Image (spheres, rainbow, N blue to C red):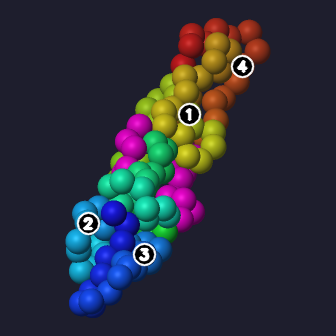
């Protein structure tokens, strides 16, 4: 696996190029690495496909590096591993935030703070002399 041979009478196979893979033996070509991840180790079983981690996505095929996985922006999160679209990055609901890129879930605002908006990256501190429940 991870190799191919498209010429007859050859004693060895050719390793698949970066961004391509071949999961089966005896094939004459490699397949383009799918969206949602990258192929950086073509000798692994299954062709070396590594899915993007939760909190990121890759919309392009033929990727060969972890850098191909784009992080969800602040104010959004995605629990999906191997996401192939930026649409998996969902805005945090009111009362929660994602203060940095690439998060798999939004965090609840701590006691003493709140957030009424969706898609927020930070919580708002409660005013002096006021009470704010969690979120």
Depth check, front residue: 90 or 113: 90
Mark 1 vs mark 3: give the one in front.
3
Residue lying at 25% horizontally and 63% vertically, measured from the top left: 24
Q: What element carries label 3?
A: strand
Q: Where is residue 12 in the image (x, y as percent from the top left)?
A: 38, 79
Q: Position of residue 10 (x, y in %)?
A: 32, 87
Q: Position of residue 87 (x, y in %)?
A: 35, 53
Given contact means CB atoms under 8 Å apart, are the residues at marks 1 and 2 in contact?
no
Give left or right: position of 35 versus 122: left
Give left or right: position of 93 versus 30: right
Numbered marks: total: 4
Given contact means CB atoms under 8 Å apart, are the residues at marks 2 and 3 in contact?
no
The tag on residue 97 is 1
Depth check, front residue: 50 or 59: 50
Crowd band around label 4 with a 10 angstrom C-alpha radius: few (<14), some (14–19), many (20+)? few
Q: Which is more N-terminal, label 2 or label 1?
A: 2
Residue underneath mark 4: 127
Crowd band around label 1 with a 10 angstrom C-alpha radius: few (<14), some (14–19), many (20+)? many
Depth check, front residue: 97 or 60: 60
The tag on residue 25 is 2
Per the model, the C-alpha gap separating discs 4 and 3 is 63 Å
Given contact means CB atoms under 8 Å apart, are the residues at marks 1 and 4 in contact?
no
Residue underneath mark 3: 15
Magenta region, residue range: 65-85
């Amino acid at each position: 696996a991870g190799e191919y041979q498209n010429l007859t009478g050859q004693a060895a196979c050719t390793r698949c190029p970066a961004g391509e893979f071949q999961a089966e033996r005896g094939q004459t070509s490699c397949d383009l690495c799918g969206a949602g991840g990258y192929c950086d180790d073509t000798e692994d079983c299954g062709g070396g496909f590594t899915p993007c981690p939760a909190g990121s996505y890759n919309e392009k095929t033929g990727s060969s590096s972890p850098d191909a996985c784009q992080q969800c922006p602040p104010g959004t999160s995605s629990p999906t591993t191997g996401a192939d679209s930026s649409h998996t990055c969902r805005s945090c609901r009111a009362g929660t935030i994602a203060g940095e890129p690439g998060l798999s879930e939004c965090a609840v605002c701590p006691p003493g703070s709140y957030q009424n908006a969706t898609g927020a990256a930070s919580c708002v501190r409660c005013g002096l002399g006021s009470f704010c429940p969690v979120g």
